Image: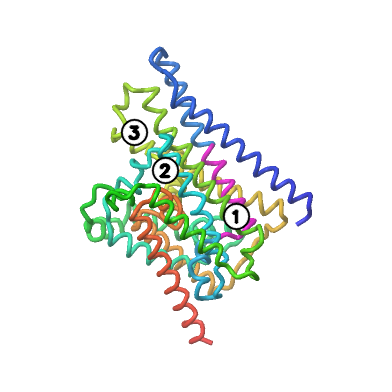
């Protein structure tokens, strides 16, 4: 890519990031304002402004993620299975860098009162251990066959890969069926009923008297040691992969930030409608969240086909943003092209997408939702899910290699 194109790409991504920061500052003002003297019309206007700010931020955050993944080729699927397929841990270390950035920054926002992660689904939900294990393992197998993780297949579709598009469509179909359709009964009646009796899923609370900062310090030290252990000849020693991992970790943090502030701002400007942070209506719409694609992809499809019966939200906006961001990044870099993989790969894309959709919903999140957003909140369920995504991806890679060699 020429220097001119590279400069345009970097300038656009920088501009988008600053635009997101503008909305965060704006939301921070809403969260701290005194609304007692405002009229009903002013309160309605502010609520509309909060809604539009969150949606636009979702588009921008998704666009930024799509552009970063498209240019860096970051993929958590590769981070998992490359350990056995290529013996290369560059992508694994990039994932570690994303966590290295996201965990302390998210926890700092929590301690400062900007993001109440205690009300997020990762901390506040029942510990459905079998769903985490089975869903994570099935999703891990799926990402190998689909040729990419939940964000990567969206990016591939955005840059013209028809195999990626098949994976996305299969993922949407399967996740929707597992959320609301024919396989939802299997999830609810058999998997989600098996839970552990925990107060919450916050790791520091589960360790008793151990302070949160000590848990964070241990995790950060382990991640840093893993990254520093890379061989001198590794690609990791350059700037591309560390920067990509750090950028993705930062994107997860700003997604937490904007949604966390919105969760604070809405009841602040409308205390008549919402009784407090535990209000069921408030949690249904404004619960603190970051990036995830399990629910988001299914909601996006439902929004597109129903339209009049649905409303756009942050999750839907991020999916549309990823597609747009990857498309624009591919155009600027000159890498956009329609690609039709061989028929056998199409079969893999279809099967992989179906497994991903079922596994992601069963586990309450994908490799981004549980693997980055959830772990940055220090959720025990997210750690368990991500561990089994790793196991599933490794098992899937080994089985695929064995089946290919058998057919040869």
Q: State the residue position of label 1.
A: 244
Helix, strand or loop under label 3:
helix
Q: State the residue position of label 3.
A: 282
Q: Which numbered circle lies on residue 289?
A: 2
Please name whichever residue, 217 or 391, is drawn nearer the observer in this view of the structure: 217
| Rendering coords of residue 119 (x, y %) | 33, 40
Report the magenta residues as a range.
57-74
| Rendering coords of residue 27 (x, y %) | 49, 29
Helix, strand or loop under label 1:
helix
Please name whichever residue, 203 or 291, is drawn nearer the observer in this view of the structure: 203
Give the mark, 2 or 1, whose residue is nearer the N terminus: 1
Q: Is residue 345 left or right of residue 369?
A: right
* Spatial CA span between label 2 and label 3: 13 Å
What is the crowding at mark 1: few (fewer than 14 residues within 10 Å), some, or many (at least 20)? Answer: many
Give the mark, 1 or 3, whose residue is nearer the N terminus: 1
What is the crowding at mark 2: few (fewer than 14 residues within 10 Å), some, or many (at least 20)? Answer: many
């Amino acid at each position: 890519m020429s220097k001119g194109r590279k400069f345009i790409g970097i300038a656009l991504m920088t501009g988008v990031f600053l635009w997101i920061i503008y909305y965060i500052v704006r939301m921070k003002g809403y969260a701290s304002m005194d609304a007692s003297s405002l009229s009903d019309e002013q309160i309605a206007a502010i609520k509309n402004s909060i809604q539009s700010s969150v949606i636009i931020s979702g588009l921008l955050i998704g666009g930024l993620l799509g552009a970063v993944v498209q240019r860096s080729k970051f993929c958590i699927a590769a981070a998992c299975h490359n350990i056995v397929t290529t013996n290369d841990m560059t992508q694994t270390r990039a994932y570690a860098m994303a966590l290295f950035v996201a965990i302390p920054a998210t926890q700092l926002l929590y301690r400062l009162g900007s993001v109440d992660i205690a009300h997020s689904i990762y901390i506040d939900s029942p510990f459905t251990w079998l769903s985490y294990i089975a869903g994570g393992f099935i999703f891990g197998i799926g990402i190998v066959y689909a040729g990419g993780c939940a964000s990567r297949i969206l990016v591939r579709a955005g840059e013209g890969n028809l195999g990626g598009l098949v994976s996305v469509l299969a993922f949407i179909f399967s996740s929707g069926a597992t959320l609301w359709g024919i396989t939802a009964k299997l999830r609810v009646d058999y998997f989600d009923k098996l839970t552990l009796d925990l107060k919450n899923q916050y790791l520091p609370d589960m360790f008793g008297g151990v302070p949160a900062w000590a848990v964070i310090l241990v995790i950060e030290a382990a991640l840093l040691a893993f990254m520093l252990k890379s061989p001198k000849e590794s690609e990791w020693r350059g700037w591309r992969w560390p920067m990509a991992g750090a950028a993705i970790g930062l994107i997860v943090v700003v997604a937490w930030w904007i949604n966390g502030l919105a969760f604070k701002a809405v009841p602040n400007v409308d205390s008549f409608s919402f009784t407090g942070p535990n209000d069921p209506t408030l949690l249904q719409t404004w619960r603190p969240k970051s990036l995830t694609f399990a629910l988001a992809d299914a909601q996006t499809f439902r929004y597109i086909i129903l339209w009049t019966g649905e409303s756009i939200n942050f999750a839907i906006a991020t999916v549309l943003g990823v597609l747009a961001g990857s498309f624009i990044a591919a155009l600027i870099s000159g890498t956009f092209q329609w690609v039709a993989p061989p028929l056998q790969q199409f079969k893999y894309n279809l099967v992989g997408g179906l497994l991903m959709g079922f596994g992601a919903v069963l586990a309450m999140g994908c490799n981004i939702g549980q693997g980055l957003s959830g772990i940055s909140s220090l959720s025990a369920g997210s750690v368990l899910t991500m561990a089994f995504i790793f196991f599933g991806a490794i098992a899937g890679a080994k089985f695929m290699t064995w089946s290919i060699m058998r057919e040869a």
